Image (cartoon, rainbow, N blue to C red):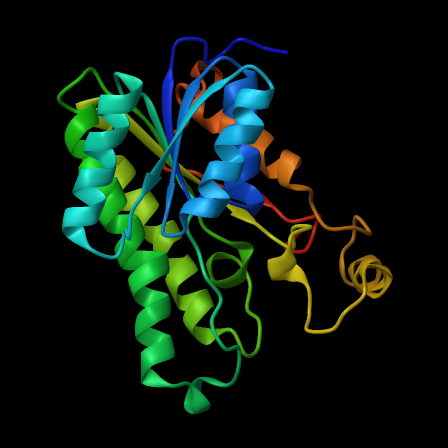
Amino acid sequence: MSDRFTGKAVLVTGGGSGIGRAVALAFAREGARVAVAGRSPAPLDETVALVEAEGGKAAAIGADITRGPDAERMVAQAVARLGALDVAVNGVGILVAPGPVGDMAEDDWRHTVDTNLTGLWLSMKYEIAHMRGHGGGSIVNIASNIGAHRRAAGLGAYAATKAAVSALTRNAALDHIADGVRINAVSPGPVDTPMSSRPGETPAAKAARMRAQLPLGRASSTAEVAAAVLHLASAEAGSTVGTDLVIDSGATA
């Protein structure tokens, strides 16, 4: 296993499950100290336990990133518990009540925008504020191939927020590269997580659907998405600025 991140301090929002958990584990396996943040403590504690079971160092931070004071406190606690902040991965994301735009409840729209877009912006705001005063760093945002790169009926709010995340990433990258903060995004397509399953769908039915829909014949694994995140955060990608790397089994090829 590589030691690209030995001695580095990494914050992962949405680190309690799915892609976020895979990212946290991947960083820890490459030597990083990791803080995972989110609303629910139990999943975060599970991620910490998994990291520690492999000999890594991790901490859990409860935070509602849709609130500015919480986002600011999250970053401050990450720095206090890790001793620094070299890398941040903003992975919080929700998909609420799919359906036509004209039938969407206002509360569902606001909740999606608050979490997927405003929460990510607030996280970046305070991550950048720390990094630019402490020698720089790297930020990787989790966008999506839906919205940023293709369309999907019934997912208007989710698509709108993820397209905005991609655009925000590119603008922030230009705004802050002179501060030594390198910002990029990853846009996963279908990933083998509960979010990509349909209600009542069996694993076999899901696999058959992915074979039919995706040129590669399967969804991406969380480990594959995590590998892309680590590459963008690493010194190997030192001249990669403002990119949005699509990992979607050929869906947008």
Numbered label tally? 0
- Which one is nearer the viewer's eye here, 231 or 198? 198
Q: Residue at x 61, y 53 (%)?
A: 189
Q: Quadrant of residue 227?
A: top right
Q: Where is residue 135 in the image (x, y as percent from the top left)?
A: 20, 15
Q: In which quarter of the image is residue 89?
A: top left
Residue 85 in view of the camera? no
Q: In which quarter of the image is residue 209?
A: bottom right
Q: Where is residue 205 in the image (x, y as percent from the top left)?
A: 84, 66
Using residue 72 as the reference point, say whether residue 34 is left or right of it: right
Q: Position of residue 75 (x, y in %)?
A: 23, 34
Depicted 174 relative to depicted 214: above or below: above
- Which one is nearer the viewer's eye here, 148 or 62? 62
Q: Residue farthest to the bottom?
A: 103
Q: Residue at x 32, y 83 (%)?
A: 106
Q: Which residue is drawn at 64% across and 11% down?
A: 1
Q: Position of residue 218 (x, y in %)?
A: 78, 50
- Which one is nearer the viewer's eye here, 244 or 54? 54
Depicted 41 relative to depicted 3: above or below: below
Using residue 61 as the reference point, say whether residue 21 is left or right of it: right
Depicted 31 relative to depicted 148: above or below: above
Residue 4 in view of the camera? yes
- Which one is nearer the viewer's eye here, 47 or 134? 47
Q: Which residue is drawn at 53% across and 38% down?
A: 46
